[in-house]
Image: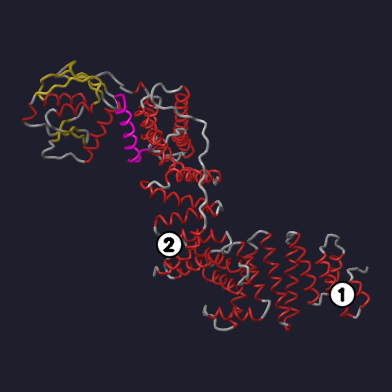
Amino acid sequence: MRCVLFALLPALAWAGDAEPLPTRGPEPRTLQYAPTTGERPAADTKALAEDVTALKRALERVRSAVASGHAGDDQARADLRAWTERAAPEDEHAGEPRIGQRFGERLRLRPGQMPIIDADLEGEPLNEVLVAFAQLLGRAVDQLPGAAGRRPVSLRVRDLPLDETLDRLLGQAGYGWREADGAIIVIDPQRDPPSAADRDRAARAALERAAAGEGPRAAEALYLLAQREQAAHRPVEALRRASALVDRFAGDREPTIRVWAMKGMVAAGDAMVALGQIAEARTVYRAYRMRAVAIRDHAERHRLFPDLATVYLSGAAAARRLGEERADPVAFDEAADELHQFLEFYGDDPALAAAAAEARLTLGSLLVRAGRWQEAEVQLNRHAAAAGKAGHQIHLWLADCAYHQGRFDQAAVVYDGLVRAWRAGQAELPTSAYAGALERFGLCLVSRDEPRSVEGLLAFLRHRREFRAHPPSAEALVATARCYAEIERDDQAVAALWELLKGDGIPDAAAGRIEVDRLVGDLIGRSREYPGPVRAKVLFYMGQASWRLAERDRSKRAAAATDAAGFYQRVIDENPPAELAQAARLGLARAALAAGQEERAVGLLKEILRDPVMSERDRQFCAQLLGGHYREKGLLREAIQAYRGEVSE
């Protein structure tokens, strides 16, 4: 069943003949980067400060948007409220400290969202210390250790969170713990291995401890905490962690710390995207990118900005999403530009081959949207070569590229193959895509240097039968009318159409005429749904078709000429462009004469001959018509005047 698609692949060989367009050169940047050794220049410090300021402003806008209900979901707004409450100093450790009954001032707890412990215990039984903790917290302790519970433990801490305090306390005896239903459950790892939740809590606690410190470990821990929150679909928390990382460490002179601060900027941008704040995310991505490209040394740039490739892709995705949400062509152009830059820097990197192939596909689709057909063709062919295959969508885009560059025969092969695949039940795209392919197939046939009007009209007939729910484009509507006018020119064209229709199950010319008449009726009816210039062109070609029928079939001359005159008059009533209006006036005069409407025809011909801006060709045509009419009537003097282009009163 997939042989049809494979048959399309040779048709794409022509696309590879085009010379690839040169990539866009790097743009000059105003920011400059100095080596990290020694004191950093004031300009570099100022630039970093501006990056942090821009992030803070974007952060405040995101917080306002989430809080007002204009971004994120209910959970995001709840997380934001918790973040705001946690940031308030007066709420940090509300209430008076609690003192243990058993140990007095040697064990103190300061309540809050994260209780803080002060302890000065030496050689106390583990179980007694656990019971004292339970009394301070107002909770139960489940599954106290047996013999190991009598083991003496020491605990000397100050300002330590409860979670870490319990880790240290129970860890001395080789135990762990978890919290469930308000109770502290002691875990023996030998009999009850830690669950995923236990391991996650322990990892988080370790990261929290590291984040509270200083130096590269603290910066890395904040970044990892932000990544954990983002992976858990908590973008507000991720944004909080990332902004704290940038705020604390972006101005640090240590290169290792600076790497983590810059990664924090990327994490902040990703969290903003998750919250739907695309414009703010682009501000952050742009700040990161500009800082990176200011460094001329390639190795140094990628050491300090390891996420640059990801930022190019994330920025392009954000710009594209912004363009879709706002119907903003500038945003689409920015997305294409960022993808071009990504491919310039990373297109040949083997480690990023998959990402580069995907970037070429996205870039190709953006260039197709922008009508930049030659550039799109290059990128789509490179994507197909890298991927080793091409689906229907890529075939369709490549055919569009060929069509718009005037390679109609090559495009027609692909369009026809796609439609055949759809008829064979091998569709990969929505039905509308195959309807468009059949329409473009017909347009290819009639757009050649030697138009194939009969086959083109057959394609439009099939489109009407197979895709009635998908109305034709204005271009196809006009082309259908033009094809209809062309086949009425001679008997051979009409006979050729009837032969082709037999292959579609239409047995004879009479049935074929009914089918064509249905198409014509549908054509005229649909033209009312299109703008005036489109209707005018359709009506003009319908007039041409009726006139050619009048010339071809003498028995129908009067009726067909009357129909033609009616169509031409409707064209004039549409107030079309001057060239089309003039052609319709000439056609109306000729048809009116053939229909026996002599007074109307003579008056119109005289009016045209008096027109001072009439072209010489049209003036001679009118003179021939009027002169011939007078000669047939025996009015030789008037005929001579008319042949000279003179108009009698």
Q: Earlier in the sequence, mark 1 or mark 2?
A: 2
Q: Find residue 136 and report its horizontal and vertical position in percent.
A: 20, 24
Q: Is residue 366 above or below residue 583?
A: above
**Image mark for residue 527:** none
Answer whether residue 432 is visible to the viewer in this image: no
Q: Is residue 451 magenta?
A: no
Tell me which segment is drawn in magenta. 212-235
Residue that sits furthest to the left in the current view: 147
Quadrant, the N terminus? bottom left
Q: Find residue 265 and report its horizontal and vertical position in percent.
A: 41, 33
Answer whether residue 516 is visible to the viewer in this image: yes
Q: Depth check: 248 or 535 in front?
A: 248
Q: Quadrant of residue 245?
A: top left
**Looking at the picture, which amino acid does disc 1 mark?**
Gly
Kindly identify which residue carries mark 1: 627
Q: Quadrant of residue 191?
A: top left
**Image mark for residue 428:** 2
Q: Is residue 554 above or below residue 303?
A: below
